[in-house]
Amino acid sequence: MLEISRETFSTYLTIKEAAAFLRVSPATLRNWDRVRKLVAPRRPLNGYRLYRPEELMSLLQAVGFRRAPDAGSPSGVASRDRRR
């Protein structure tokens, strides 16, 4: 069985962080995963959905969405939303 280090998972976003980055609800991401629009890799032990920031940016570019300059990073969006 393939062992995956904790550092590998630190490069991924949780469903809550990915939803904040895309400005959609976590339920929307679950639905997209179910209908195969945006399939999220799963964490092996608990089955949680994990998202790569690069894939989320590709999705935004594919639909022609441009982010505001201050919201260019997934971690910046998630931390900004926590301050509200």
Image (spheres, rainbow, N blue to C red):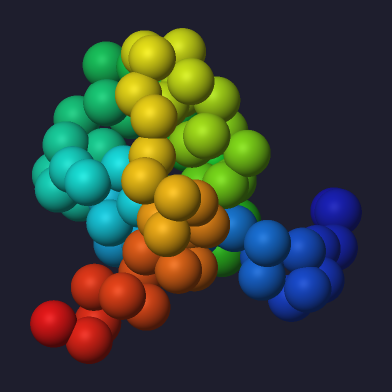
| Residue nearer the viewer, 71 or 26 | 71
Which residue sits furthest bottom? 83
Q: Position of residue 47 (x, y in %)?
A: 45, 55
Which residue sits furthest right? 2
Q: Is residue 2 above or below residue 33?
A: below
Which residue is pictured at 52% across the width and 34% down the height?
Answer: 57
| Residue nearer the viewer, 19 or 15 | 19
Which residue is pictured at 24% across the width and 73% down the height?
Answer: 81
The reply to whether residue 46 is visible in this rendering is no
Task: Residue 31: name its quadrant.
Answer: top left
Q: Is residue 15 above or below residue 60?
A: below
Q: How many marks?
A: 0
Which residue sits furthest front? 69
Q: Is residue 38 left or right of residue 29?
A: right
Which residue is pictured at 14% across the width and 48% down the height?
Answer: 25
Q: Position of residue 74 (x, y in %)?
A: 48, 58
| Quadrant containing the C terminus in the rendered view | bottom left
The reply to whether residue 7 is visible in this rendering is yes
Q: Position of residue 76 (x, y in %)?
A: 45, 68
| Residue nearer the viewer, 72 or 30 | 72
Which residue is pictured at 49% across the width and 68% down the height?
Answer: 75
Q: Position of residue 2 (x, y in %)?
A: 86, 54
